[in-house]
Image (cartoon, rainbow, N blue to C red):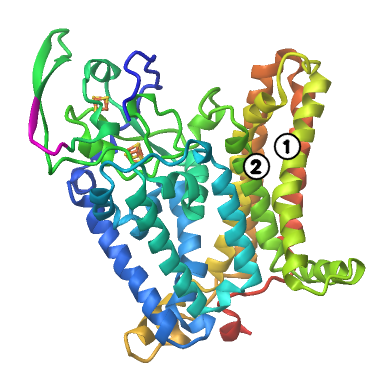
Amino acid sequence: MKANHQRRLHQPAPGRDLLRLPLLGRLLRHRHGRLALQALLTLGALALIVDGFVGPQSAARNLATVAPWVHLRGLVVIVLLLAGNLFCMGCPFTLPRSLAKSLARRGRRFPARLRNKWLAIFSLFTLFFLYEYLDLWASPWLTAWLIIAYFVASFALEAIFSESAFCKYICPLGSFNMVYSTLSPTRIAVKSPDICANCVGHECVNGSYAPQPVIRLDDIPTAAGESRQIEVAHGPRGTLGCGTELFAPQIRSNLDCTQCLDCVRACPHDNVSLFARRPGAELGRAGSWAQRWDISLLAVALGFMGLSNAFGMAPPYYALQEWLALNLSLSSEFVALLLIFAGLNLLLPAVAALSAAWLGRAAAGFQKRDSLRDTVAAFAPAFAPVGFGIWFAHYSFHLLVGPGLILPVVQEFLGQVGDWERWSFSLDAGLIGMIQLTALLVGFFWSLRLAQKAALRLYRRRALLGMLPWALVFLVMMLLAWQIFTLPMEMRGTLELFG
Ligand code: SF4
Ligand code: SF4
């Protein structure tokens, strides 16, 4: 892919360059820095597969269930909030990318019609549905198969298509991480847009692979206002460019960025880096996200999926399932669950977003000026904090109920006696409740502030009227989540030990 050289290069001024930090920066910038992290996580993934197949088929005693469904999910939301999309950076599923890429150097592009987030919404929906329907959290064996399916799907798509289609368009974990990394305090940016304007090869996105060695000279401007020639080498050992086809000087959002740092390693002018920023800075900025239905509905639906995922562990969910079975004469659990999930995860978010957009626009008197698509797109980033608050409250609950349980599970996996007595402790229930409430409230007020900003941008003096329906949606989401978290929840993966 060749980025358009003439397009206006716009980025806010970068903050602190994190790749200049003494040890960590060098490690991350190193040609094999990411590979080392991926190799480590791949070993972990292989351990899960082995234990899933040959270990005890008990959810609370098997690595395949405890690690991903209890600990990893809790850690991912904490790391997203404090650092960034480090899971995608170290993702074991993309380790075969280099190998697959050597098969796909001249691979075809992913079909144009599928280059959007509809598949990602579908795969998120499918994962959460299967999680509930197959009780994935309770089955080490099925979880091991799921991990294998991930490896196979990622490898196959990397081998067939020239871009990282799996990461960008399909992977449900990646989609989750990308949406919520928009809240993170880090981002990829260029140091000097002037250098990019004079860069010929755009290696950050195109990479530096060539079947035969080629040397090129770029005239790059210096700080003193002069220009100097820089030698740029391409060859068979060249570096991969951005797999998700982001052009570094035009990046305005963490959406689609796996923080793999391939662009950093590929840029021949050392002009791109990982920078610190104000958490969620992009969410309040107009134009950070493309005005597209698929992107907007992904952010909205993910928040509602957080609600339904938590709801699936509370008693009223089972009552609803029974009610549906009785009143609609549904004998199949599959159909009842599908109806509940389609209603809560797809229909409800779409109806909520469209109604809020229509009502807000009408109340502010702008129904003739703005399309529904543009109105939803303006408010969609505001769903990230409230949605993340719900996921954080849920995942942190499971993590904090048994934070040490992974250790005896690892001990048993290594053939030792698991020290369950020592590590089967739980955080105080009141403290966990406080953490959950704080996450929900911070998410709600953050979303409210973003909606206010969007409304001021769109409706100026009538902003209050225009933002009210959105505020109501956030309030209902937050209150419903709190209501669910105060119900007795299934202690998945830890039941047998604490029950
Ligand atoms: S980031 Fe580097 S490779 Fe990309 S356009 Fe700028 S100077 Fe060129
Ligand atoms: S922009 Fe850079 S860090 Fe982000 S996905 Fe592309 S290559 Fe990786």
In the depicted view, which residue is nearer to us: 474 or 299? 299
The label shown at residue 278 is: none
Is residue 404 visible in this depiction of the protein? no
Q: Residue at x 20, y 49 (%)?
A: 27
Q: Which residue is mark 2?
A: 300
| Nearer to us in this view, 147 or 183 | 147
- Which of marks 1 and 2 precedes in the sequence? 2
Which residue appears at 46% of the width and 81% of the height?
Answer: 62
Residue 15: x percent and y percent? Answer: 35, 29
Q: Residues in magenta?
A: 210-215
260, above or below 197, in the image: below
Query: In the rendered structure, are the residues bearing label 2 and label 1 in contact, judged by CB atoms less than 8 Å apart?
Result: yes
Q: Is mark 2 within 8 Å of ligand 2?
A: no
Q: Is residue 209 above or below residue 406?
A: above
Left or right: residue 127 versus residue 313 is: left
> Which label was assigned to residue 353?
1
Taking the image as drawn, is residue 383 in sight? Answer: yes
Q: Secondary structure at mark 2?
A: helix
Residue 199, given in percent of the width and then of the height, sits at 22, 20
Q: Position of residue 1 (x, y in %)?
A: 33, 30
Vertical arrangement, residue 217 with respect to residue 443, above or below: above
